Image: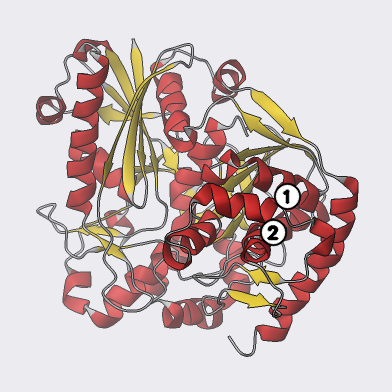
Amino acid sequence: MYFIGIDLGTSSVKVIAMTPSGSIVGVSTADYPITYPKDGWAEQNPEDWWQGTVLAFKSLLEKTAIHPSAIKSIGFSGQMHSLVVLDKNNDVLFPSILWCDQRTQNECYILNNVFGKEKLFNTVSNQALTGFTAPKLMWLKNYFPEIFSNIAHVLLPKDYIRFKLTGNYATDYSDASGMLLLDIKNKIWSTEICDFIDISMQVLPELYESYEVTGVVSEEGKRLLGLEGEVLVVAGAGDQAAGAIGTGTVKEGIISVTLGTSGVVFAAHDHHVKDKHMRLHSFCHANSKYHSMGVMLSAANCLKWWTDKVNIDVPFEQLMLEAEAIPANEQQILFLPYLMGERTPYANPNARGTFIGLTPTTTRGAMTRAILEGVSFGLKDSLDILRLMDVPIEEIRVIGGGSNSNLWLQILASVFDAPVSKINTEHGGALGAAILASVGFGAYDSVESACESIVSTLDTILPLENDSISYGRLHERFKGLYAALAPWF
């Protein structure tokens, strides 16, 4: 038997097949476009997600020769916050406004200052940020009232794929946490927020734990995907919660760090925990518990910008060798990694990327290293908040494309002044989705037992004492630099 994990990312969908023991027997992906109608806007067509998912799923079956009847359940991981609105005929009313879209600054101001930031914090455990879903609904109401009035269903990206597979309107608590519509502590939709933004709770999906079965693949879904027999569909999780499942971050003391397009510091909690200063997100976790999360909008994306836009003709390996040749204690320049604004700890959509300290002797290698260090400093901002909250930090696990760089991992360990570990899989959210599918089917009795059986740590990178001292000083300058530039931003 096999369990399928569907990871609906921002630029592509990944579909994996997993055995009950956790072995990955096949992986398939499909890309889809993002459109940027205006500066700061980002949209996608949900139909592109569905067509990509069908393509990747069928490709997976072809490559692996898995018999269609051997697939028993499907789980999801999905980009969070992005808005999908359907009419009564289940047609998409408006392009999906993505998590990275920044058009809702005015709506966030209204939520934070009219409804009230403290009231929001007490109601949904978070402040309003441009990425969240509720401000997007308010924006639609303000600028497209006719479309807003025709909304029959509000979904998140992965839940649109679930709808196409099953006909059900459902979501899980972890993904719903990022909508700014969920009373996170009590795990119910917030009547107060829904009333304030004038959205009927009847249009919101039914809520489930991430490992609970929400339905089965319909006959039409099976025909399109080439499946046979009953195939269960579990709720799945938002990408960061699913990624944490994929790293085994399900117990207090384990911290996961994602070095992907965005950067995330993720801590699992047994009980509901909130940062009183509202710098960290407080969300439900995919194991029926809770988590805190600090988010950088640009992490590995900063390095991608540097390699793909600025140093187009320079091999990546050469850039990294040049950066490695720069000793940490000789670094004199700093990079603020805020290419798309920032969430944690500043919640400033207007923040921008910045180099400072350049001289006629500055080399490209020093600038490349400053990017690696700047992203690491940004992640340390979130880790330090967890430390101030007395969250236990016993083990730090690193995933994402940036974790493939030994240099970056070494810098990260020294910046954190703590060991960091790689794990035995690179599939992150897709693996987490498949694990949730296996639990929903009954192959494991809990998410924790599944993670303990499937996920393990590999190499551990220790901090370099002298580098940690140098980075401690640089990090203080890094924080001061943001404070100095905030008025200019």
Report if the CB atoms under discs 2 and 1 are less than 8 Å apart: yes
Which residue is painted at 61% across and 76% down in the image? 354
Quick check: 10 above or below 443?
A: below
In the displayed structure image, the side of residue 353 where residue 438 appears, left or right:
left
Instruction: Report the amino acid beneath label 2.
Output: Glu
Which residue is painted at 32% across and 46% down in the image? 12
Front-lying residue, 108 or 397:
397
> Which of the labelled discs sits on residue 373, or is there none?
2
Which residue is painted at 16% across and 63% down in the image? 93
Quick check: 21 above or below 247?
A: above
Q: Quadrant of residue 473?
A: bottom right
Q: Which residue is mark 1?
A: 411
Instruction: Report the amino acid beneath label 1.
Output: Ile
Front-lying residue, 99 or 444:
99
Label 2: element kind:
helix
The picture places residue 86, in percent across and down from the top left corner, at 19, 57
Q: Residues within 10 Å of mark 2 (few under 14, many from 20)?
A: many
The picture places residue 421, in percent across and down from the top left corner, at 69, 34
